[in-house]
Image (spheres, grey):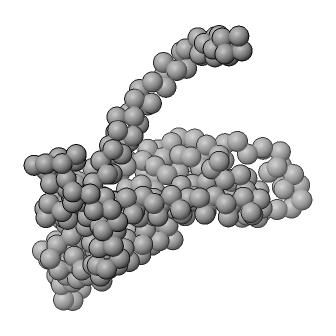
Amino acid sequence: MERITWWNRTRRRWWKDRYLFLIAFPGILFYIVFKYVPMFGLSLAFLDFNPFLGISGSEWTGWDNFRRIIDNPEVYRVLWNTLLISFLQILFAFPIPILLAVMLNELRNDFVKRMIQSIIYLPHFLSWVVVVGICFIFFRGEGIINGVLTGWLGLDAVPFLTDPSFFKPMVVAQVIWKEAGWGTIIFLASLAAVNPELHESATIDGAGRFQQIWHVVLPAIRSTIVIMLILRLGSVLDSGFEQIFLMLNPFNRETGEVLDTYVFTKGIESSDYSFATAVGLFKGAVGLILVLSANSLAKRFGEEGVY
């Protein structure tokens, strides 16, 4: 009898929220098809996979592929490149949307504010192929930048695209130019929820604009900043396959190759599917640990965290 009552109660609740479930269905279907169903392929990490024999016919090797990761010095080099690029993006690219959102929030002319927002949003809609292509046009040996250096300033041409020391700064600069404007949306939404009475009280107390930003605006969006930082740490090993792959060449591969491009090279080009799957699974496990650790740390400091 209790089971029937529970089922009737659940069915009534589902029927009551049927339109919400209908709206959520495409998103749920997306995650099932593209996120959960492919997880069955993770079994390749524990096999010596042979595409002619399939998953069921391939030999089970247990943790051998993960031992190969530990014993392979290439993995450590690629892991270091991935972590360095990601932390450079966090250090330089993550604060830019916060700064832009605060600056836009201080504008009093709505027309100018909307125009600036539209301009800085536009690069987000360009594909990485276009962004990297623009970068090549500007920074190649006969490009605009070297043309200015050699023709106008009388300096030697700089090999921006082949010198490994320029790879990481260019990747971070591209991320800032493409995504900084789009990243301001969430922070602007948080700023819109700040109580205007707080600004009025601060003004009565004699606080200037910079003091109000420091003591009113930033504390008001601190929880949003923490949540976005936690989510960003969860993808710290995702440096952006398409961007890095397009920027790589034989001259900068040593310092520019990351886990995503390494998995592609091993899995697709070298047909080492099991090892590539093991590296991808290792990357996901590290991301999960970082999210859990960052969320726990945020709660220890009194923030809400992601969950």
Of all residues, the one furthest to the right in this rendering is 205
Location of residue 146 (image quadrant): bottom left
- Judge by depth and name the residue closer to the eye, 213 or 218: 218
Quarter that holds the N terminus: top right
Left or right: residue 208 versus residue 307 is right
Residue 139 screen position, x and y as percent: 22, 72
Location of residue 38 (image quadrant): top left
Residue 108 screen position, x and y as percent: 63, 47
Rendered residue at 54%/63% (across/down): 290
- Judge by depth and name the residue closer to the eye, 12 or 196: 12
Relative to 79, residue 132 above or below: above
Location of residue 242 (image quadrant): bottom left
Q: Is residue 183 visible in the rendered structure shown here?
A: yes
Of all residues, the one furthest to the left in this rendering is 52
Rendered residue at 43%/44% (across/down): 118
Left or right: residue 15 versus residue 212 is left
Figure label count? 0
Residue 107 screen position, x and y as percent: 61, 50
Rendered residue at 53%/62% (across/down): 289
Relative to 192, residue 14 above or below: above
Q: Is residue 277 visible in the rendered structure shown here?
A: no
Rendered residue at 86%/61% (across/down): 206
Residue 134 screen position, x and y as percent: 23, 60
Relative to 169, residue 304 above or below: above
Of all residues, the one furthest to the bottom in this rendering is 155
